Image (cartoon, coloured by chain):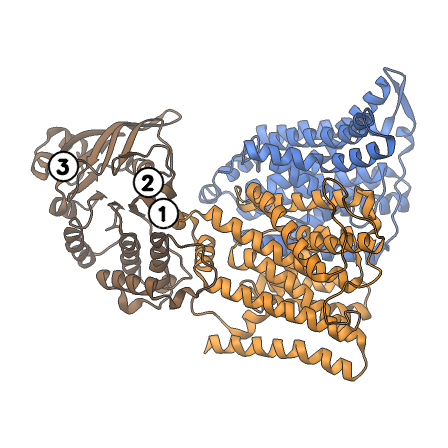
Chain colours: A blue, B brown, C orange
Amino acid sequence: MFSLFLEQLLNSLQSGLMLFLMASGLTLVFGVMGLINLAHGSLYMVGAFACAAVAAWTGSFWLGLVASLMAAALAGVLVEMLIIRRLYNRDHLDQVLATFALILVFSEGTRWLFGSFPLFLSVPDILTGTVVLPGALEYPIFRLAIIIAGLLVAVGLFLLIGKTRLGVRIRAGEADRGMIAALGVNIDRLYTVVFALGAALAGLAGAFVGTTQSVQVGMGEPVLILAFVVIVIGGIGSIKGALVGSLLVGFTDTMGRFLLPHAFATFLDPSSATAIGSALASMLIYIVMALVLFLRPSGLFGTEA
Amino acid sequence: MPDAILSLSNITKQFGSLLASDDVTLDLRPGEIHALIGPNGAGKSTLIKQIAGEIQSDSGNIHFDGQLINEFDAVARSRMGLARTFQVSSLMPEFSVLQNVMLARQSVSGKVFRFFRPVLGDKSLVEPAMAQLERVGLADRAQMRAADISHGERRQLEMAVALALEPKAFLLDEPMAGMGPEGSKRLTGFLDGLRAQAPILLVEHDMDAVFALADRISVLVYGRIIATGTVDEIRGNEDVKRAYLGEEA
Amino acid sequence: MTMNRETLINSILAIALVAVPLIAMGMDEPFIITLATKVAIFAMAGVGLNLVLGFGGLVSFGHAAFFGIGGYAAGILASHALNYEPIMESPFLIEGTTQMIVIWIVALVVSALVALAIGAITLRTSGVYFIMITLAFAQMIYYFAISWPAYGGEDGLSIYVRNGFPGLNTLDPISFFALCAVMLGIVMLFSAVLIRSRFGLALQGARQNAQRMTAVGIAPFRIRLVAFVISAMITALAGALYADLNRFVSPTMLSWHMSGEIMIFVILGGVGRLFGPLAGAALYIILEHLLGGVWEFWQLPLGVLLLIVVLFARGGSVGVLAGERKHA
């Protein structure tokens, strides 16, 4: 039982960290530019497809990984300069619609290029296989690698925001957009950089998760919605909130799906327990979100009034 | 001494290390114009917001029309008869001038959740609204979009909306803001006659208007009321002169 | 003259909606009648959303939840009736039904209750939070529908025989179209009356300046909640009709893509314009039919068109054709 528990715990951690990669980019873009971006899930998808395509073409997962970062960042830069830039001063409705339109363009464009069947990314040889953990749990090395990579990225992001000049500009931009322009910071470039950074993070997450699951059109959307829930829980504009929210959502979702059917099985028949348990598990995150909002309408670490 | 319609006792509000309102006590009596003046940053807007119900005081009491209103939110206080105008005109830009005032009448009438009668044809709203527009001199602008009228006209509309609420007291936040000398003179004359309808707590920087209109003046400096008195008393007050050193007094 | 131009466009749209299926009937093209019915139903869903989105200024990205509730009301009630299985036996008997009117009432009541619950929570937030939370709640209902096995889960639920309406052969395409068109007309009339009423004035006021609303003594929250509930009910009614049109209901009706599509109808036609949803739905269906027949990936140019509309043609098609409005 312990090994099963540990496995689910590690899966939760992985899920939470991947979600953090998505949510951090999303919350940065919202915090610095005041823009809600529905196409973030598409950037996740672009990263996954780039990785799969390049990995298949060159035979190297690592090249694929580099490709995913570059492709997602490039897509981010293009989209920002062509379209997103015109939306900063628009109201949220326009931003929602325009980025929703972008989803259509990205999804159908990808389907056109790659077809509707999922692609598969294979785990690089170095990272295949399992490692034995306490409780005689055999856990895939690749998943551990993702967890470590996710943690490294999280640390890196905190360092970037907290200790670098770019980070200072980002934090200043979140606090007072007009002021940093008046202080001579090149706003256009800052915004493009922030957007590209978010895109790269999303693309990276897409590549990682695409390897453990599959790469297909529309893979980014469920993740995007979870990222929204994370940001709502954590508070818009807060990276710390994104981390806390991601871990909370990751754990709630994974452990919920694991524990709830078991819990119901203690007093219900197996088929009802599975049915009710899974149904409740899939709704659990949203219930948690509703609760957090009820108590703290701006999220746990929200800066927005 | 007639009972004050609005009274603040020991109002305190702190934002972190900033003491925005420091044990403020003042009252507004029927028939009077009570001006609230003070240098920039004195805490006038914070005080207005606390009176209007937009922010909660940390301590102290606010009484209005004989009731303790600490727990009442801004909507409730407005319904009780406290009408406030904003320093920066706060109107519905897409509505016509008339529609802006009609909305206020609608609130006063208490009948907001009516779904079937067309509002623009409703004489019980249109006529009183037009009457208020005539009072402020905007009747010929009635059908224009609020976004399309001039700045001065928008201040007049702001006033008309407050009038339409038929309040028991007015809370006017720098009504002269951005007005030229002609407009200020007209508004001063208008406010002079208004005090008979309901007392006015007037926040203003325009000292000519303040000295012309005020029955009493309270001076707010760094969140504290340093003096309250008649125009002459305040004019002669040493503390006030010191507080305004370098500013017109 | 601008008001008259809009009225002219509205009249053209209304006439076209009625004329096209009649012509199609004459030419024995039942498929076109089905398309026209789809337009009417989508327009109705859009009218519902437009109430909160266009007039209320609330970007609800979860209206598919109500569309789907209406659809499932039709599906669940019909399936229980056709299987002769009551929905509940104790503490009191609730049986299924294949009567549309009853189904509509159920759809309206259930959606109103759900909207009241969701609205009470979401309307306390604003801006981006509101968008994300309405989306999240709709997703919650979507995932619930997928995982609840009793009504088909992911595969959906079929309605073998289209539900009945007194005096009509609902299986006849033109009769069903007429029913949907009449319902659309009623809903649009109701929407128009609502917007011109005191409530409508307050709703549009709350959209433009919530601070001023508070200052005149009207609580924006209450106004918005009532609008949200009414809009949900209208969209749910459309959902029930949609389920009957397709004789099928599935979680897709609850998906956020559906929420996005309903938004597209409203935007393409013109936010806050009475006939906007009809114009938008018609445009969408025509594009889907014409472009979709030619190119499988027709949603790509749709996306581009939508981008152009959002970036450059803010008033939607009705706005572009009719010009600026005088005042609200």
> In front here: A101 or A264?
A264
The local secondary structure at tag 1 comes to helix
As drawn, the label of residue C215 is 1
Residue B34 versus residue C210 in the image, above or below: above
Write down the quadrant of residue B4 in the picture.
top left
As drawn, the label of residue B52 is 2
Which residue position holds label 3?
Answer: B2
Chain containing mark 1:
C
Mark 1 and mark 2 in contact? Answer it, CB < 8 Å.
Answer: yes
Q: Nearer the viewer, mark 1 or mark 3?
A: 3
The local secondary structure at tag 2 comes to helix
Do marks 1 and 3 share a chain? no
> In front here: A1 or B82?
B82
Residue A170 versus residue A262 in the image, above or below: below
Question: How far apart in space, not on screen, are marks 1 and 3 (Cα)?
Answer: 27 Å
Mark 1 and mark 3 in contact? Answer it, CB < 8 Å.
Answer: no
The local secondary structure at tag 3 comes to loop
Mark yes or no: residue C62 visible. no
Do marks 1 and 2 share a chain? no
Residue B98 versus residue B112 in the image, above or below: below
